[in-house]
Structures are given as C-alpha cells and as structure tokens.
Image (spheres, rainbow, N blue to C red):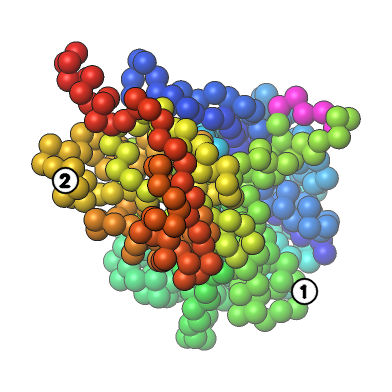
Amino acid sequence: MRITVVGDLLLDVDINGTATRLSPDAPVPVVDVGDVRRRAGGAGLVATVLARDGHDVSLVTAVSDDDGASHLRRALAGVSVLAGAPLAPTPTKTRVRIGTHPMVRFDQGCAAAPVPSSTGEMLAAITSADAIVVADYGRGITANTDIRDALTDAARRIPVVWDPHPSGSDPVAGVSVVTPNLAEATASAKAGGSGTGAEEAGRYLLDKWGSSSVLVTRGEDGALLLCSDGSAESIPAPITNVSDPCGAGDRLAGSLAVHLGSGLDLAQAAARAVEDASAFLAAGGAAALAAADGADAADGADAADPPEVGPAVELKGLELVDTADLYPDGVRLARSIRDSGGTVVATGGCFDLLHAGHARTLAAARSMGDCLIVCLNSDESVRRLKGAHRPIVNVEDRAELLLALECVDAVVVFGEDTPEACLAQIRPGIWVKGGDYTPEELPEARLLADWGGHCVTVPFHPARSTSGLAAALAKVS
C-alpha cells in the first residue's frame, strides 16, 4: 500500500542508564549512562513504523540542515523523504531513563516555526497515495495552503487520518478520522465552551472540524469512536504493561489509515488500530526503534534493538512517587508477567532506612524470577508495628528509593498490618523473606499455596538493621 505521511519531524534522543546511588551534591539519582539512542519522532515515527510494516511510505515534511537533521535522515532510511526549504533548528526531545523509568525530558528547538514551503513532488505524493496520515506536531507543515488544498482534495477520494496537536492547524474538512487524545479533546471543548466529558468533547470537535468521525483515545481505557451520523462506540484496549506510552498515538494513527485503506469499515479499523497500539507498547514502544550511537551492523547486533531491561513502573519525572498510582501498576505488572509465562517474585517490609542488608536481600529475590514487586508498609502501618517514633522516612521517599534500585520493578503500598490482601492481588509465584526460620513457618505460606506459589527465606546479614543504623545516626546527629 502506498501511504503518504504529512507532518512535522522531531528528533527523539534516549539516554539509557542505571542508577544505584544518589548524588552527594543533591538528593537526585546519579545516572551511569549505558548508551545514547536516536530515532525519528513525530511524523518520522509514523513513517518509520509503516515502512517497517512493509508499506511504500512517502514523508511530506520540512527538514533542517543542522546536525540533528543528519541523524534524522539516517533514522529514516527506507522512507522517501520529500521536503521543502530547510528549517532550523531541528526540534529535539531528549529523555533520560533509568532502566525503563523515564526520569526527565529536555526539549530544544521546539518553539513555533515559520510555515515551510512545498514542492510539486510533495503535492504529487499526496495526490498519488492510497491512504494518508497527517501527524501534526505544531511546526507548521499543515498550515501550508497548497498542502491543505491537496489534503482537502484527497479526503474526497481516499482515507485520511489526522492526528492533531494543540498548537497545530485545524484538520481540513471531510477527513475520515481525527484522533485527539482525551486531554486534547477536553481542552479544546472547554476552550469552546462545550462540556468536557469524552463524548461531549468529541461531539464538539466533530462539529468544529467537519470530519466524518472523531476517535478520542483514552490510554488504557481504549478509545471512543464518534461518527457524523450520531453513533458512538466505545473500543476497549487490551490489558498491557506499559512503562512508557511514547508513540502510542503515532502507531494508532498509522494503523488506522492502513486498515481503512485495506477496506475495513470504520469501527473495525478503529478496533484493530487500538489493538496495534497496545501491541506496539507491549513490544517496547517508540524506544525499541532507536539506534544506539556508534552501532555497527557488522558486529551482528541489531542497532534497533532496545537495551535489555525488565518491565517497570514509571517514575514520574523527579517528583515524589504518587503512592495512589503504585498499587494498580504493580498489579498490572504481575498480571502481565504471569500471562507471558514468567515468574513473579515479591517481598515486603517497612524498608525505613535502606541499608546493605536490604540491598542484598532484594538483589537475591530479583534473581529468582522475572520481576520483583516490593510490598511496602504505609506510614500508618509502620507506626502500628514499630511505634510512634517510626517511620523515620515517609512512604513516598521509601517507595522512590526502592524504585531507584535496578532490582526493584514495582512497589505496592499497603495499609494493613500484614501483606495478605496485597499478595492476594499480586499472586506472586515466590514470596521472599529474610530470617532464620523455615519457609513453611512463614504465615504467608498457606496463602501462596492457594495459587501454587511458595515461600523462600534468605538469611539476615549480621550487624545490618534499620534499628542499628538509626542508633548509629543518633550518636552523630
């Protein structure tokens, strides 16, 4: 299928590393960089994914003449790039990750740019396409009058899927589907004086844009398809463990155009596109497409392979972990690992002051399976167990420090005195505890036996305890 992607190019840079310590200068993780990977973002990501699927892809865009542009051209090998006059600078988004935990993002050159020019070759690619995806990232390509006229004409003949941007241009009238996410849809509806529920916002945009349909994407809740004939259909998303949703909207828009171009009706195409986006994220998402700097194809390695890291729960930038978000993430991770045939390992405790004994126990536990989930006592639970003077460190900081350890994949906070209710939701195959008693003596042993799990004990490390550490600190405070 001949597919033309019209939109704005971005350069995405992933800095991947590990963090096992905090900086002495400030309470932030020190990232030991493992590799730096670059990939085409924005419309370039849509084009890259479609080309990898085997389609004949043309990309109508604007390309700068700086160093970032040279990286983009290498990343777009196999895609016919058709561009007008160069724009500078190349918009670049740099993400720093610990494992798969996104830590911080730096944006450069992402401010508004002049409307780029077009060429006859660019317009011909729109005219000759079997399907079109517009990936608007607010950099001006969709504001070009000649390109808009060509897209308006194409929308009368072939499927045109438009992925909008808050700072971009309105879609041309008559496109097959516009695919705003829920936040974009509700913000536009609110600005226009409409209701901000998903359906109300979608209806508002349907009237505003004059498209045949609007597909409001809602992350793990799937999507809501609203059509000009007044119909509405909720489309569920498969349950997927996601550490980074980057690229989901691009994958969905590209797949939607392909399925419409192959003859599926709108509802079928939308359902298939939601499934494709979920599968894309499950396979590593956009980060899996990035090539490492200095990668050499002659060494037998696939430069597009992602770094080998386990599934993880997203750390929200450098802010404290929202403990309300940790519980469902840990449960979803456990379910995903079990569904793929892996072994879920869990351990629990207060972890009030992390010390070497904790680190050794956690590392040993992680080596027993495919993920490690820590069941963490809430502040109230710790006070009931340890007394009014505890915890020394609050639950948000305890959870964040645990997640900074490479061996910990998720943290689940529980408020009871024992973790039984928490374990019933996670259903680990192995429950690890420190101590010098036998696994059968653990109170959790009978519970785990209900689903075929078992308990394992690892020895305590002498002279390493929270109480001992607290006492030593008190002497020097």
Placement of the C terminus among the 4 image quadrants:
top left
At a point 40% along the width and 35% down the height, the residue shown is: 460
At a point 64% along the width and 61% down the height, the residue shown is: 341
* Magenta residues (range): 293-297
Q: Residues within 10 Å of mark 1 (few under 14, many from 20)?
A: some
Q: Please tell me whether residue 389 is drawn above or below residue 333 in the rendered image.
A: above
On the image, numbered disc 1 is attached to which residue? 262
- Label count reads 2
Q: Residue 391, position in %: x, y?
A: 20, 39
Is residue 349 or residue 9 the one in the foreground? 349
Where disc 2 sits, the SS reads: helix
The residue under label 2 is which amino acid type?
Answer: Arg
Q: Is residue 460 left or right of residue 123?
A: left
Give the foreground label among 1 and 2. Answer: 2
On the image, numbered disc 2 is attached to which residue? 383
Residue 305 tag number: none
Q: Is residue 116 visible?
A: no
Q: Residue 360, position in %: x, y?
A: 47, 33
Q: Is residue 112 left or right of residue 248?
A: left
Placement of the N terminus among the 4 image quadrants:
bottom right
Q: Is residue 136 left or right of residue 205?
A: right
**Reading the chain from its start, which is encountered first: label 1 or label 2?**
1
Q: Please tell me whether residue 458 is drawn above or below residue 200 in the rendered image.
A: above
